[in-house]
Image (cartoon, rainbow, N blue to C red):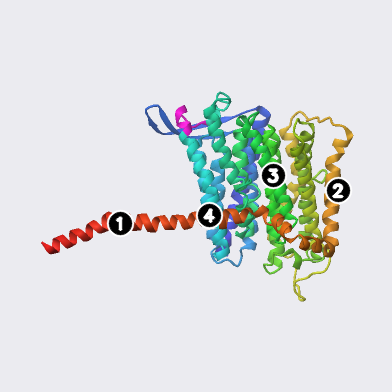
């Protein structure tokens, strides 16, 4: 029992901190209040290296959501990771992960952001390789190296901002909005955010990171690692307004959304489908942020965190019961065997689809209506709505495969809803997934947002969702005909299902060649010619001369 006590202690502490942070956040919103704390570490000439903390409504609300989800994930891990002998080490890693995220959220300063940013990258590597097999090592390496690109971009941005005398970017954004120098910093920050939030062309690490334990996936893919990039860009949103960067981010976000929506419809791994849906939602956040609606992006980030964590927890409970089987083709009629888990799973899925009056509806519907009202090109408009249809399509496909039909795994099936600890944390998140959206809507948009559209645009969102859901269900139902079609066009299906060949480009192509090249370099130069003409040869010659003498 001494191994399990740390879970309960961590859960209680994080949950209490989450509540405190939430009530402070409400107080700060209502009174338009900000606390800015500076701790000077080093002062050289005119350069100050300062640890800065910014407590405003945004950081406090985000912190409360991250703490709440991580507390429930730790409580959930108590049962999910029960067979793990070293569960303490796992909980410590998760706590390190959460504290890195806290650093990132409350820092308006580039130096202190780097502390949290690198902490996230390092601890996520440790968590992805937690199960210590070849697959998870490869996934961890891909995750770490993809994120390194963003870390380097952030370091370059720090070097560029040296000219301003301080790294408190929050003071410079308005002032230098149109200067070339700030545009360069903006581009570097955007690059960093794109690697962390897995936008095209850095998307391949996100489904690979599913090698981590499911509680980690629930934490990473809902509110921490992948949303760090979006959060950073929300803080830097001034640099995206009416610039080339904004247009570029809009295009890449839309393409990411489209690509992952298509990929999820061809995927059979339960966790990878949910990971691709996370990628799709990240694309949505990025693209709406690029259009200048940063508050909407933040709103969707928070509501998405709730139902996505719930979705992963339900998937974890299913995998736990299915004897660690993740293939959805082996599932079926789970709604009879695990009714409570299935209810949570379906409600989270409907929230993801934007079912009216669940949490996802408030943010998604508002985003799509703002898109309909905005001045934008047809290509982006089409991608927004088509990707929304694809979201509903793969959600209904997932429900068809896992909930209906016959159970296809083993004849002796002992599936049940007996995991009470897992169920408790799922039910708390379920309540938030149902009521969170409306609660946040009242908090964040004090004056109601009125969107006036013609009836065909107003109904377009609903129609796209209904058509997507129907097609997802029907394509799965008449799967024999459909699979023959996809086998006829095997190369095309393979292209769509493998994320447009992005994993091959990033692993086999670029990364593999880079690693081979670096091995060649180290063998020929560092351990080769440099040794021959440098230290080793000098040592040998001196030895020979001394012996000769």
Cα distance between the residues tagged 1 and 3 = 49 Å
Q: Which residues are magenta?
A: 160-168
Instruction: Check disc 3 and report its element: helix, strand or loop.
Output: helix
Mark 3 and mark 4: span between their CA atoms?
A: 23 Å
Q: Label 2, on which residue?
A: 466
> Which callout, 3 or 4, points at the residue further toward the start of the chain?
3
Query: According to the image, label 1 marks what residue?
Result: 531
Q: CA distance from mark 1 to mark 2?
A: 68 Å
Q: CA distance from mark 1 to mark 4?
A: 27 Å
Label ID, residue 255 = 3
Taking the view exactly as shown, the residue that stands out farthest to the top is: 175
Residue 118 lies in the magenta stretch: no
Q: Are marks 1 and 2 in contact (CB under 8 Å)?
A: no
Residue closest to the eye, 152 or 481: 481
Mark 2 or 4: the one toward you: 4
- Dot placed on the residue nearer the N-terminal end, 1 or 2: 2
Quadrant of the snapshot with the N terminus: bottom right
Query: Which element carries disc 2, helix, strand or loop?
Result: helix
For label 4, the residue is 511
Residue at image point 14% right, 61% down? 546
Query: In the visual, does 536 lie left or right of 43?
Result: left
Find residue 390 and report its horizontal and vertical position in percent.
78, 49
- Mark whose residue sits in front, 1 or 2: 1
Question: Is 333 above or below relative to 351?
Answer: below
């Amino acid at each position: 029992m001494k191994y399990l006590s740390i879970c309960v202690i961590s859960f209680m502490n994080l949950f209490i901190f989450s509540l405190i942070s939430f009530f402070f956040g409400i107080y700060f919103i209502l009174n338009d209040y900000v606390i800015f704390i500076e701790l000077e570490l080093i002062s050289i000439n005119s350069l100050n290296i300062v640890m800065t903390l910014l407590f405003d409504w945004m950081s406090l609300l985000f912190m409360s959501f991250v703490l709440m989800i991580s507390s429930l994930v730790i409580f959930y891990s108590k049962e999910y990771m029960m067979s793990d002998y070293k569960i303490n080490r796992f909980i410590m890693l998760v706590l390190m992960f959460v504290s890195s995220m806290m650093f990132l959220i409350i820092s308006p300063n580039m130096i202190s952001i780097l502390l949290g940013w690198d902490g996230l990258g390092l601890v996520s590597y440790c968590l992805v390789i937690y199960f210590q097999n070849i697959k998870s090592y490869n996934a961890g390496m891909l995750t770490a190296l993809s994120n390194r690109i963003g870390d380097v971009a952030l370091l370059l941005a720090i070097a560029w901002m040296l000219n301003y005398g301080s790294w408190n970017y929050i003071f410079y954004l308005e002032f230098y909005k149109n200067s070339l120098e700030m545009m360069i910093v903006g581009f570097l920050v955007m690059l960093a955010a794109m690697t962390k939030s897995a936008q095209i062309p850095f998307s391949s690490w996100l489904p690979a990171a599913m090698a981590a334990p499911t509680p980690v996936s629930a934490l990473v893919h809902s509110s921490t690692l992948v949303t760090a990039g979006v959060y950073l860009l929300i803080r830097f949103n001034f640099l995206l307004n009416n610039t080339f960067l904004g247009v570029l981010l809009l295009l890449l976000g839309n393409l990411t959304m489209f690509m992952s929506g298509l990929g999820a419809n061809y995927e059979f791994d339960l966790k990878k489908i949910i990971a691709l849906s996370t990628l799709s939602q990240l694309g949505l956040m990025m693209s709406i942020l690029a259009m200048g609606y940063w508050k909407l992006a933040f709103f969707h980030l928070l509501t998405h965190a709730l139902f996505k964590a719930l979705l992963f927890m339900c998937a974890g409970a299913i995998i736990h019961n299915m004897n660690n089987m993740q293939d959805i083709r082996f599932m079926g009629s789970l709604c009879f065997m695990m009714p409570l888990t299935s209810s949570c799973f379906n409600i989270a899925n409907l929230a993801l689809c934007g079912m009216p009056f669940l949490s996802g509806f408030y943010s998604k519907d508002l985003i799509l209506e703002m898109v309909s009202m905005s001045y934008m090109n047809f290509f982006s408009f089409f991608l927004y709505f088509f990707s929304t249809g694809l979201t509903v399509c793969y959600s209904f496909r997932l429900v068809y495969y896992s909930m209906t039909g016959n159970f296809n795994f083993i004849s002796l099936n002992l599936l049940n809803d007996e995991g009470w600890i897992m169920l408790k944390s799922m039910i708390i998140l379920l309540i938030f997934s149902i009521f969170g959206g409306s609660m946040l809507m009242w908090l964040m948009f004090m004056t109601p947002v009125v969107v006036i559209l013609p009836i065909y645009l107003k109904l377009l969102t609903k129609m796209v969702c209904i058509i997507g859901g129907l097609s997802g269900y029907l394509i799965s139902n008449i799967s024999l005909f459909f699979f023959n079609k996809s086998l006829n066009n095997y190369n095309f299906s393979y292209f769509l299902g493998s994320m447009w060949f992005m994993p091959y480009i990033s692993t086999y192509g670029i990364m593999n060649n880079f690693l081979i090249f670096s091995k060649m370099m180290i063998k020929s130069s560092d351990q080769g010619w440099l040794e021959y003409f440098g230290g080793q040869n000098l040592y040998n010659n001196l030895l020979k001369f001394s012996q000769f003498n």
